[in-house]
Image (cartoon, grey):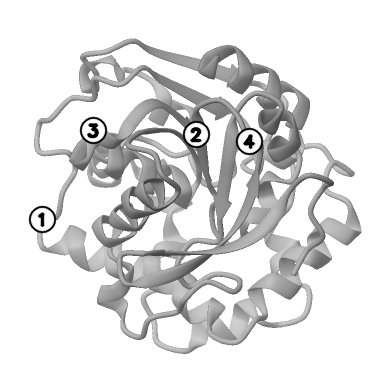
Amino acid sequence: MWRMDAGARQERIRTNGIELSCAVAGDRGELVVLLHGFPQSAYEWRHQIPALAEHFRVVAPDLRGYGASSKPAGIAAYRPGVIADDVVGLIHAVGADRAHVVGHDWGGAIAWRLALEHPEALERLVVINCPHPAAMAHALRTDPRQMRRSWYVLFFQLPWLPERVLLRRGAISSALRTARPGTLRDEDAAAHERAFAIPGVATAALNYYRAAFREGLRGGSTGGGRVIAAPTLLIWADEDFALGRELAEGMERYFSGPFAVRHISDCGHWVPEERPDLVNKWLLEFLS
């Protein structure tokens, strides 16, 4: 387990029939829930937790399958809707009815799902480098560049081989390449490696992709024409190796409430770790 900053504590919180290992900080203000991406853990938010905890109650879970959180068996246990239900249950378990939700990468996908299916649980929404599901589905049908960028999603559908590749020494560190060399310290990359190597994590993390792919083949939810009323901020790093800048364009149609996009030109996919000061500044401005 990674060492948290002073004032943060580790708690196991029961939700939706499982337990999530959570970093918890702050004792006043509204609730902020931070949802990490693949192949990371709540450690991704180590720079944001202390800054937000000065003004908010903060809960950063290791999502189901990650870290010390429960790891249910089977691909179906990792459907996006199930993970969104985990987050709603987490909000209620800490005594709140609603929360500000911030998600990066897969955490962003879960945040979109929560906004579409559980708007009653959401105050404000911040998504970092994850497109709205309808925008992503459209790009995967019509944009050859995005199809090429997303090749790994098909690779992840294979049994056992992706796990073997990702568990090789240095594989996760190599995947966490940044647009600005040196912004992710060696010890941080090593912490991500250790967290991903916990038994069961690799398969659980890959099952997010497998479950979503199967749902997509069945015509799964891309929002069903619903719009998001919660005030929403999309933070987009333009040098993302996996997701093109165009995915953040023309998204206003998906919202009935206030919506804004903020671009970062000199940043890759791992935004909270590559540009923590700027992310913290924007989060505090938007959520306060």
Q: Are marks 2 and 4 in contact (CB under 8 Å)?
A: no
Give the Cα separation between the discs numbered 4 and 1. Answer: 42 Å
279 to the left or right of 87: right
* Residue at left offset 63%, top offset 33%: 239
| Nearest-to-viewer mark from 2 and 3 | 2
Q: Which residue is mark 2?
A: 31
Q: Which residue is mark 3?
A: 119
* Residue at left offset 23%, top offset 45%: 141
Give the Cα separation between the discs numbered 2 and 3. Answer: 15 Å
Q: Which residue is mark 1?
A: 219
Residue 27 position in % (x across, y down): 63, 36
Q: Which residue is mark 4?
A: 27
Give the Cα separation between the discs numbered 2 and 1. Answer: 34 Å
Find residue 196 and report its image quarter: bottom right
Q: Is residue 189 above or below residue 69?
A: above
Q: Badge 3, how many Cα within 10 Å: few under 14, some, many 20+?
A: some
